[in-house]
Structure formats: C-alpha cells, structure tokens
Amino acid sequence: MALTIIKSHLNNTHYLVNFQQNSTRRNQNTRIQTKHIFHFNSLQHFINLSMKKSLSSSSSSSSLIKSSLIDPDGGPLVDLVVPENEKALKKKEAESMPKLKLSKIDLEWVHVISEGWANPLKGFMREDEYLQSMHFNFLRLNDGNIVNMSLPIVLAIDDKDKETIGLSSDVGLIAPDGNLIAILRSVQIYKHNKEERIARIWGTTAPGLPYVEEVITPAGNWLIGGDLEVLEPIKYNDGLDHYRLSPRELRKEFDKRQADAVFAFQLRNPVHNGHALLMNDTRRRLLEMGYKNPILLLHPLGGFVKADDVPLDVRMEQHSKVLEDGVLDPETTIVAIFPSPMHYAGPTEVQWHAKARINAGANFYIVGRDPAGMSHPTEKRDLYDPDHGKKVLSMAPGLEKLNILPFKVAAYDKTAKKMAFFDPSRAQDFLFISGTKLCSLVEKKSKSKSWRNSHA
C-alpha cells in the first residue's frame, strides 16, 4: 500500500531520508553535543570469556559452528501450544470452564508467552511474580538463580469477570474473533493497583502514555495469573505471519546458516541509511574480532505501537526492499517480527527487549540513543535521559551473559553528502534524523491519513 509513499519521498533510494534543514536541527545538534554516546571504543571492549571460548572453537574447520552461543533464560525454551493429539480433549474440557474475552493486546501477550520470548514464564504472572518483576526487574527461580523480567506480563479483569470465575481454578480464554484460544490453569486473582504499576514502570503518572491509555486505564481492578495452555498457534492472517518466527525457529535458522555470532537490532520505524551504516559496521567489526559468520537479526517490533509510528505492513515491505536492493545482505540478515506490544517505558522496557532476544539466540544486542523512549507526554523534553538505556543494560541483573553494543551516532554528513558516523569536532556539518522524524517527514509530504492509523 503505502510503500510507494516512502519511495517517492526518500532521496534517490528507499531508505535514505531527504534531510532538510529545519528549525529542529539546532535543538538536535545541541542535545547530541553534550552526550558521549559517540565515543565508544571497538567491540573488543565487550568480549568476555565465553566469547573467547567460542572464537577458539570456531577456528576448527572440522566442527559445525552453532549459533546457540547463549542459552535461553531459565532453562529450555517453553512451548505452551498443546500437542495436536491432545487438542480435541482440551477444547472439550475448556468449553465447560468460565470464559474471559481477550483484547487484541492480551492476545499479543499470549503469543509472546506461548513461544518462549518471556522464558521461563509459563503464563500470565501470579502475584509473587508480578511483585518481583515490578519492584526488582527480575524473577528468582527455584534454584536461586535469577532471570531478567523488567515488564510485568499480566492479564487484567473487572469485577464482573471475577464474579463469573468464582472459585473455578481454570479459565477459558476467548480471542477477539470469538474463538477459544487457550486455557489458564490454577488461576490466582489479586488486586491491580494501576497507579503503582504505572509509576513503577514509567516513572511518571503523567497523562498521555500510549500503553497506559490503551491498556491500563480502561482495564479492570484485578489481575489474574496462571499457567497457559494454548490450543492453537497464534496467527494474525495479515499476510505477515511468515515473518513471525518463534525463538525456536530463529535458533534453527541461525544453526542452518552456521552463525557463530548473532547480533540483534530492534526498530519500530523504517530502516534509513543511518541504521544500515550501523548494522553493516557492526558486522565488519565482528569479522575483525575473528568471527567467521555473524548474522544480523533485524527484528522490528510487531505488537501494539502508538498512533504516529509507521504501520507494520508498510515497515515490513520497506525492510524487504532494503534486502532486495542489497543495502543489507540477505545471506547474513534475517528479518523477523518480534510480537511484543510496545510500552515506551525507556530503560525499564529495553531490558525486556534485550532479554527476549537472548531467548531467540542472540548473543549481541545493539542499543542506541533513548531506546524504547518517547517525548514527555505533557512537556517539551524527552521522557528519559537518552543515555540511560545503554547504561542500564550494562548493569541489569540477569543480562550479564548478553553482550551489549552501544552504537555510534550516525547522521547525514552535509559535506560528504552521505550518512556517516557523527564527528563532534564538526558538529555543524551533520543533520540528525530519528525514526519518529522519518515518519513525520513522510506523513507531511504524503498528506495521507493512513500513516496515523493506530495498531490497536
């Protein structure tokens, strides 16, 4: 549909923005000059002992290189989809249970949990898991180990739902289309303190937070947790399901390509040449470090996003074109959809994004300026310090085994007339563009209302 809009308003290619001087340039340059994100050293700084071992083993030509350099969090990947030979019996059993109707975003969370993105979580959180996640950003396992879990994954219900469930220990879950999609076993119902939840996750209760307004504010005053049994794999029938590879499927694909390093990059807007420069430079540096076949996981977020983010189908078509035109090498790049909804919760949320990629097999995670952030909903400033995301990731409990790669800032070099890494000694020669600005430029030029369609 709207890919033609992107094509007609990007400079000579499908991914290089027509950088125009405007009133925001001075503000952007001033903000960037005060930061240190562009002074990071080579990736060598982030090598740890496990990586050195993998480098040594990869030098042997007689052994098959495996991508699974990093184990899933908390043990083997969960797979909560009921086996085919048990489905009929489970569905019959579920028909007699109390039912809960899921929203579209609730269904996205069922998808996330069922495939192991939140491993080792096996269902919507019960109260002890919820409190650990909300207050500590991790879960403590029975063996004493911890796994990072910075976002509570919960299911809200109202008073009427609570009354309907009564004393039942099991509940059937109904998808938005009316189909019985899952069973929630051994349920626990507990209070949903919305103000506390919002304050802990976002650090503010200011009005205008997209996920809060879409999900939490209208939700009920109770949360229900329990173990999930998913009766059918989650499908959206939107022409994009073939991009929705599970962690298990991604690991198999990495092994098939004989990857010895996997570096993940998440985005929620179109790829521009700054992104491409960064991803190609990261692969180059991994090769210089001794890796033989680093694979890029280009992993756009596919769940709920705010209204002014570019729609998923447009983004995926544009990402496909980037591979088709050779801007990224299709032999060393896997494009897949990450099914999680977006919170825009900055340093708290970026931990979730990194943790989920561990479960998919990535041992490197690229993090940029203000990851998972947004503008303050009521004030003219960023909601979060743009450097805190990468700093938090380097210290986050449970993410020690993941190699965090803070990237250099890329911008349009007006002198060289191309994208380049920012040189603070000649800051006046650079123009900056973010994914949000890219979306705004395209929207302004296209004069199309389709760019502001909500995902929800």
Image (cartoon, rainbow, N blue to C red):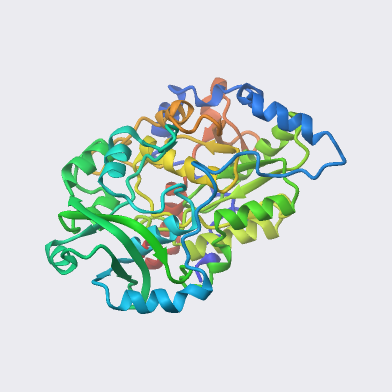
| Residue 8 visible to an observer of this rendering | no
Q: In which quarter of the image is residue 222?
A: bottom left
Q: What residue is shown at x 64% (from left), y 56% (from top)?
A: 322
Q: Nearer the viewer, residue 381 or 398?
A: 398
Q: What residue is shown at x 36% (from left), y 30% (from top)?
A: 385
Q: Left or right of 221: which side holds 211?
A: right
Q: How many marks?
A: 0
Residue 444, given in percent of the width and then of the height, sits at: 41, 57
Q: Left or right of 57: which side holds 443?
A: left
Residue 22, given in percent of the width and then of the height, sits at: 42, 42
Q: What residue is shown at x 51% (from left), y 69% (from top)?
A: 83
Q: Which of 439 and 195 is in front in this view?
A: 195
Identify the image quadrant of the C terminus: bottom left
Residue 381, given in percent of the width and then of the height, sits at: 30, 35
**Outermost residue toward the right?**
62
Residue 214, given in percent of the width and then of the height, sits at: 26, 57
| Residue 47 visible to an observer of this rendering | yes
Above or below, 393 against 161 in this view is above
Q: What residue is shown at x 15% (from left), y 65% (from top)?
A: 166
Above or below, 319 against 417 in this view is below
Q: Which of 60 and 145 is in front in this view?
A: 145
Q: In which quarter of the image is residue 261?
A: top right
